[in-house]
Structures are given as C-alpha cells and as structure tokens.
Amino acid sequence: MPLHVWVNAGVALLVLGVTVAAWRIRHNTLWREAGRELWRRRPLALTFVALYSAFALCDSISWIDAEGMGVREPRSLLVRAFPADFQEASYSAPLADVEFYGAQPLKHPGAHWLGTDILGRDVLLQALRGARVALLVGGLTSLIAIPLALLFGVAAGYRGGWLDDVVVFLITVLFAMPGLLLLIALIMALGRGPVQVCIALGVTGWVSFARLARGETLKLRELDYVQAARALGVSELRIVVRHVVPNLMHLVVITFVLTFSGLVLSEAVLSWLGLGIDGSWGQMIDRARDELSRDPIIWWNLTAASAALFGLILAVNLVGDAVRDILDPRTLRERA
Amino acid sequence: MLAYLVRRLAWAVVTVLGVLLFLFVLFFMLATPDDIARKAVGEKAPQAVLDQWKANHGYDKPRVWNPESPGDTMLVEHFRRMLTFDFGNSDADDTPIGARLWSGAGPSLAFTVPLFVSGLVLGISLSLFIAFFRETYIDRAGTVIAVLAMSVSTLLYIVGVQFVLGKLLRWFPISGFDSSPEVMIRFLALPVIVGLMSGIGGDLRFYRTVFVEESSRDYVRTARAKGCSEGRIMGRHVLRNSLIPILTGVVMQIPFLFAGSLLLESFFGIPGLGSITVDAINANDFATLRVVVYIDSLLFIVGMIATDVSYTLADPRVRLG
C-alpha cells in the first residue's frame, strides 16, 4: 500500500481515539471540570491550538486524482484549497504582481499573500503545512513515549526488585547523556528521516516520563486505598489499572503539554543541523538565513516560518501553564 | 558524608559503564561498521577501499566475540579507549580527537563563562525585582514577557540579532573568533547577547516562582512585623533561603561550561567544543561524536554529585546519608 493510505488510516485512527477520549472525559467529573476551567482561562490559546491541529489534519488527509486529472502524486486537502498550479518561477514579494528579481509577470498576481520562495512556492501554504510536522513531532513522539514510560515506570515502581533496578539503571544512563547530543547520536545511528527523528525524540522524552511515573507510583503504592484494595484481594493488574494509573494521569497530562513545546523547538534546531524533517518551520528558517544577506533582502520566508512557530509555541506554553495550575494538587490547595 | 560520596561514586562508575555500553549499541550495532565506512568512502567505492578504510580506523575486528582471542574485539577496544581517555583518531580527517577537543575547551570557556555569569546576575536581579513587585502590573508584564521570550526559537534570535546588531547597525562583527582579549570581546558580544535572550525567559519564570513562594513563608511575615524594610527582606531573607532550588539548576550548569554551546558556537564561528561537534555531525565523524557524548555524560555525572554537595554548603540542615 502506498504511504499516503497508511497516513490516512492513521488520521482516522487518531480522530477515533480523540473522540473516544473526549467522550470518556465528558463522563468524568474531575476531567470535565478541569476542561471547563481551562476553556474559561485560555479560550484564545486553545482556539489557536485547535486551528493549528485543523491545518495539520487537513494536510494529513491526501489522495491521488483519477487518471488524466493532472498531478500523479497524492495531494492533501490543504494543498487542494489552493489553485492546482500555485507555483511561480522564483521569489515574489507578498501580494506582488511581478517577480521580485526581473519583474516578470506572475501567474497568480496578488494571490500570494505571503509571497513565494526561491522555487516559486507559496509561502503561506508552506507555513500552514509546517503545522503538520510540528504536531507530528510533538504528538507522535508523545504517543510513542508516554505509554512506554507508563508501562516501565509503573511496573518498576509497583513491583520493585530487579525490575526496578533495571529500569532505574536505564533511566540513569539515558538521563546522563545531554538531551540534544543524545538526540543527535540517535539520529546519526538510526539514519535521517521523519520516523527516525520521532523515535529519537521518543527515546529522549521517555526518560522524564518514566522517572515521573516511577516516583509517583512509589508514593501511591503506600497509600491507604491501594493497601485496602490489596487487602480485599483485588488482583495486582486491576490495582494498577484502576487505582494507580488514573491517579498518575494528571501528571502525564501536565508533562505532555509542558514538553510539547520543547520537542517542537528541538526539531527546529535539528533541522538546522541537517537532521530535521522535510517541510518543517525549522527548515524554512534555516533556508531563510542566506536570504537576509541578499540585496534587497527577502524577509517574508523567515517572518512567516518564525511567526507560525512562535504562535504555536506561545499558545502551547500558555495552555501548559494553565493546565499545570488547574491539575496540580499543590496549586489546587493554594487556590482553595 | 564520606560513605555517601563513596556510594555515589560507585553508582557513577556503573552509570559511565552503562553509557559506554549504550554508545556501543548505538554506534557499532545499530550503525554497523559497514554503514560508517560506506558513509566515509562513498556509495560507489569498491569493496577493497571499504575494507582498507575499516582496517585503518579499527573497524575490522569482530564486534563482540572473537573465538581466537577473546580480548581482541571492538567491544573491548571501545571500553579500553574510552576509560583510558585514549580516543584515537577522527573518522573524518585522521587527526587525534583528544588534542582537538582539548584545544576547543579554551574558546568554549571564553564564551560560556561570561554568558553564565551575566545570565545568573541578570536573571536573579531581574526576578528579585519582579518578585518585589509581585501581584502588580510590573509582575504581570514580567511574566508575559518571560513567556513570550521562551516561545521564540533560538534560531530566530541568532538570525535576528546577527541581522540587526551586526548587519544593520554594524555594532559588532557578525561572526568569528580571535585569541587576543580585546578583539575577542568584540567577537563574543553577539553570541553572549543571543544566549542571554534565549535563556532569560525560562530563568526569570523559575526564579520568580521560587522567590514568590519563599516570600509567602511565615518568617517573612515575622520580619515584616518587626519592621524590616522590604528591600532587606528580599535581599537578606528571601534570597538566601531561595538558594537551594536555585543551586540545583546553577551548579548543574558549571561542568557543562566546558562543553560549550552547539548552536551558538557554530553560528558565531567560535572554535569550541560545540563547533567541533557540529563539524563531526556534518562530516559523519562517528568517532568524534562518540567521544563528545561520552565526555558530556561524564560532565553531567560530575554536575550531579557537585549539586548534592553544594546543598550541604548552602543549607546546614541538609545531611547526605
């Protein structure tokens, strides 16, 4: 099966998962209240995140046109929102009617709101498409890292013994290597590519989640309700699933939102090292470095990519702060 | 204290061995010697050239198990070299790695020490100022600015500062390095400014939280009740008691001053360890990369132990045991 079919299936699965999660949240008082509170505090930032997600989704659903309809490669919903031949010969300024160098008339005068890049591609479209890579980096990575970290961290913390020793050793070793260098080493060893980058980010992100999950499980294991469940003869697996993991979830959510922006920003750095993912904002910024030394300068590429990146990170940071304030029991007590 | 340190050091040794094992899996098992040699000699090179390259760089031994002489494997060689700090030659240009890294430590320190000191002074004094005016517009504006500053990619800071201060205003040279102090200061100005800008947001938020939390304690109220001035409360009581959480972050950074900064050094042409690392990445120089990761994890472990020891110095209540 071609790649884009797999991606489409993944998107369908993701939407299904989010719907189920949302439905579950509606039927849980604690999470529903937290969600309402979050919306009350950060309506604008949440809207921004939703917008970025919408663009990312639209760019992830793609299909190939039937025979004889032009391009034979899959084009996404987002690309289809723009005209099919939306490409000029070279640079053009935002809303310009002619090319930047040479003043040749454009195919679509005045239609490129943010101008075009060196290959004549529309900058607005590229900036919007960057949302997909950013959310892929932040989201897919967490999707890999969190379940693994929960599995290892909770098992180690709950079981103890040799399992705990092994997991603690793994965590210490991975933690001892500085984040960015570990990332680079992993990508160099695994090879360059989007999946490899996500695996590398997942391995580095795994460590902090696993540390957290293990530490909390150690505490939860000794609490009265867990002891009571054990005394009543509830099976170990059931205790973990019903009593330990749900009481970890708020920490998982907080860490997820707080690490998300870090992941996206480190992809930008990786892009600059030539280890990033094609189509990311980091790559756009990297390419734009030479454009500033041209005369007259080309500023719209850099501005568009930086603004798009800044908008997402700022929104996620604001949401992250609010999520921490709402879900962290320590701040809860202060508010009460 | 002594027993604690001994146990801590033993654990550190185990961690170092783990890091070395991890590096072996990464650079000898996942990226096989054949892969590494292919990248070095090119896709189309004949097998003989490949084998020759592998022999020259010590990649031709059995990897883990050698039935003829068990000690003569890449695994043993890897551990021996790293633990004795005899790093051998670079994969890319056959220069000795140890000497190269050693020569990079000076420029790295020349850049990171001023950045570290000025960042610390600026961060603490600014956040003391903000915490002094907590729950006012100054506080709110400071928090907003900190979040804004945190949300900008370091890449943009670099490109922006180089463009505005270097190209438009022509205040400082855009990039480069010189070993004579007067010239060096001019070259180091831009990277230090960028480093301050990209770090200040996170520092400000963290320090502010610490200071605000500390100033809601009972002893602060007592000090205020007995007539201490607000300045004296912040400077003498709050600052000193906030030292512990601040030390955690700060002491950890000191060993890494040697490691330099990957991004800033290579953007601004400082020939430090960060630049060497970036060159190694671009040249597929796996030998150098291994050593850099190893050295950095050593620095990390030293930093962890130093942090614990510094607790006892800052707070007499802390007993390590």
Image (cartoon, coloured by chain):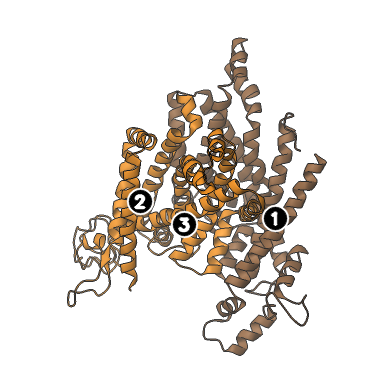
Chain colours: A orange, B brown
Q: Mark 3, chain letter?
A: A
Nearer-N-terminus badge (2/3): 3
* Residue denoted by label 1: B15
| Disc sitting over residue A307 in the figure | none
**Label 2 vs label 3: CA separation?**
25 Å
Closest to the observer, A38 or A319: A38
Amino acid tagged 2: Ala
* Residue denoted by label 2: A308
* Image quadrant assignment for residue A33: top left
Residue at 48% x, 34% y is A328
What is the quadrant of the N terminus of chain A in the image?
Answer: bottom left
Q: Nearer the viewer, mark 2 or mark 1?
A: 1
> What is the secondary structure assignment of the residue under circle 2?
helix
Whether B72 is drawn above or below A302: the answer is below
Q: Position of residue A34 (x, y in %)?
A: 38, 35
What is the quadrant of the C terminus of chain A in the image?
Answer: top left
Q: Position of residue B108 (x, y in %)?
A: 65, 54
Q: Position of residue B183 (x, y in %)?
A: 63, 52
Residue at 77% x, 83% y is B68
Please state if B34 lies on the left or on the right of A50 as rendered: right
Asked whether the beta carbons under mark 3 and mark 1 sit within 8 Å of each other, the answer is: no
* Residue denoted by label 3: A144
Is any part of residue B216 visible from this angle?
A: yes
Whether B230 is drawn above or below B81: the answer is above
> What is the secondary structure assignment of the residue under circle 3?
helix
Residue at 23% x, 73% y is A71
